[in-house]
Amino acid sequence: MSFFLWNILLAVNWALLTGHFDLENLVGGFVIGFVLLWILGRGTGQKTDYFRRVRKAIAFSLHFLRELILANLSVARTVLLERRDKIKPAFVAIPLEVETDAEIALFANLITLTPGTLSLDVSTDRRVLYIHTLDVKDVDALRAEIKRSLERGLLEVMR
């Protein structure tokens, strides 16, 4: 059984034992289970990349939260302060490094969750994602920023 499944089972058991089945208690149980599994894994000498991946997932989540806040501020500034004729919406094609259906779907949803951007379609060969953006000054810079800030972090977590 995978470490992740064990971690989930330990978190659920923690919630059941404490009698409080809420998000805070489940997260606490997940953290306690993570520490227990880490100690047991080191003691038995089992090799796994689970612990590294969880740390990367947490770091990526915090990074995405930061990007989300910055995007909200940018959209608010654009909507409130920019003149309509200065706003430059655009359709942008982003070449994909993500390959699996899960990676593509998660990447597209992360873009859609970010204010000011919307995922529209994936090419039939699944190599290009088409998005719409509210305001873009430099298409190449936007493309590079999305690939750097979202796609690279997602690939580190997923692979």
Image: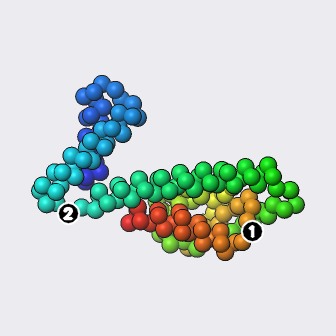
**Quick one: label 2, few (<14), some, or many (20+) residues within 10 Å?**
few
Name the residue rendered at 22%, 52% in the picture.
38
The answer to whether residue 100 is above or below residue 112 is: below
- As drawn, the label of residue 101 is none
Image quadrant for the C terminus?
A: bottom left
Name the residue rendered at 27%, 42% in the picture.
32
Residue 28 position in % (x across, y down): 33, 38
Of labels 2 and 1, earlier in sequence is: 2
Which residue is nearer to you in this view: 83 or 13? 83
Q: Residue farthest to the top? A: 19
The answer to whether residue 118 is above or below residue 23 is: below
Q: Which residue is mark 1?
A: 137
Q: Which residue is mark 2?
A: 47
Q: How is the image coloured?
A: rainbow
Q: Amino acid at mark 2?
A: Lys
**Quick one: label 1, few (<14), some, or many (20+) residues within 10 Å?**
few
Instruction: Please state if 64 lies on the left or on the right of 26 as rendered.
Output: right
Please tell me whether mark 2 or mark 1 is closer to you in this view.
1
Circle 2/circle 1 CB separation < 8 Å? no
Q: What is the secondary structure assignment of the residue under circle 2?
A: loop
Name the residue rendered at 48%, 52% in the picture.
62
Name the residue rendered at 68%, 69% in the picture.
92
Residue 51 position in % (x across, y down): 29, 57
Residue 122 position in % (x across, y down): 60, 66
Q: Amino acid at mark 1?
A: Lys
Which residue is nearer to you in this view: 65 or 16? 65
Residue 52, quarter of picture? bottom left
Q: What is the secondary structure assignment of the residue under circle 1?
A: loop
Instruction: Please state if 6 lies on the left or on the right of 97 as rendered.
Output: left
